[in-house]
Image (cartoon, grey):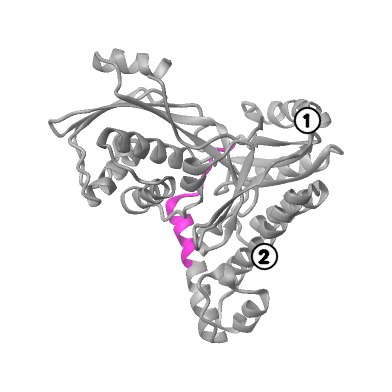
Amino acid sequence: MRIASVFQKQFGAAPAVVTRAPGRVNLIGEHIDYSGGHVLPAAIGFAIRIAASPRGDGRFRLYAVQYEERFEGELPRERIDDCSWANYLFGVVHEFGKLGHAVKGMDAVIDGDIPRASGLSSSAAFEVAAAWAVQRLLGASLSRMEIALLGQRAENRFVGVNCGIMDQAISAGGQAGHAMLLDCNTLQATQIPLDFRGEAAILVAHSGVRRGLSASAYNQRRSKCDAALEVIRRETGKNLACLCDAALEDLEAARSAMDDETIKRARHAITEEARVRQAADALRSGDLERMGALLDASHESLRDDYEVSCGELDELTEMIRSHAGAYGSRLTGAGFGGCAVSLVRTDAANDIIEELEEDYYRTKGFEPILFLSEACNGVEVLDA
């Protein structure tokens, strides 16, 4: 195993544990996890791996293979700018400390093959792989959802991104051959079989633009959704648990008390929640045409109401959508770059990939990053 040999070379001994946590592709349900909505992600074959051993001197020696960067020192109290990738692990360590599990230093190597800034959730995979490794080193016994929540807290509190629970939940609790229908308000998860009977496949294609949604832009959109919920509660008198519990009629009733931007953000959340529920039903019944139409509608809402698309993503999804072998296509992830997810006919998948390579990637001078995705298992311990 490559990561174990790198660990041996870096630290002169075999690692005590090696963990693997997958990235994810969200089929539908974008930017509503933090508004209490339902999401429908699946774990993918690309992952973050961490090899680790405990120390007793309070020092952390970390090496990131992809960046060829090394950190050595004590646990920082606040996020660091140098070796910023290390903040994901430090955040996890701090969260274990808050639970009474002190980490007295660590040697660790971090490696992975999730394309950077792709919107396929390498950050959550890092947090979940780190948390699973720390748990094994400490002998703790958190459940997979508790690990996901710990990873989310690490990103919220230490890294400084006010993300929802979706990415960490699927990285921790994914199941091969299934998408996870997750209620982000109650954390109830239902596994939905992705049984396309050989007729369809999930295509993930990178726009060629590194995901550019900054923490400030993300947090701004979240604050608009939070504000919309408060206005709807006040104007309708309804004690809604979350924004995704609202109906379009509620938004209309509160329209006069909101600015246009807040209305658009709320409208996306409410309509996307409905699309997720319909998509789960479409998958259960094998209605691929309906699923494709929902993907298209989701992209339109993300482009026009949530305003997190970009020209390249719009062009890429439209190019896929125009092919006779495509059911539907949408951006996936935070937006402003990153990837598109599409449902395509199996017998047309190779033709679509070849056309994208020629007419999109080569024309724009982008490196082709696209693959057919199967749903994989969540975080696991690997043999060292």
Look at mark 1 in the image and give the residue it sits on.
Answer: 349
* Residue 182 position (above or below residue 96): below
Please indicate whether residue 145 sits to the left or right of residue 326 in the image.
left
Which quadrant is home to the N terminus? top left
At x 80%, y 52%, the residue is: 290
* Residue 333 position (above or below residue 126): below
Q: Is residue 261 visible?
A: no
Q: Is residue 283 magenta?
A: no
Look at mark 2 in the image and give the residue it sits on.
Answer: 271
Bounds of the magenta segment:
209-223
* Residue 305 position (above or below residue 211): below
Compare marks 2 and 1 and give the one earlier in the sequence: 2
At x 28%, y 16%, the residue is: 10
Count neighbours of disc 2 (C-alpha within 10 A) and say few if under 14, some if 14 to 19, many if 20 or more: some
Which is nearer the eye, 84 or 362?
84
Q: Picture coordinates of residue 223 (x, y %)?
A: 46, 66
Label placed on residue 192: none
Main SS, magenta region, reads: helix
Task: For mark 1, give the secondary structure.
Answer: helix
Which is nearer the eye, 365 or 180?
180
At x 57%, y 62%, the residue is: 37
Q: Amino acid at mark 1?
A: Ala
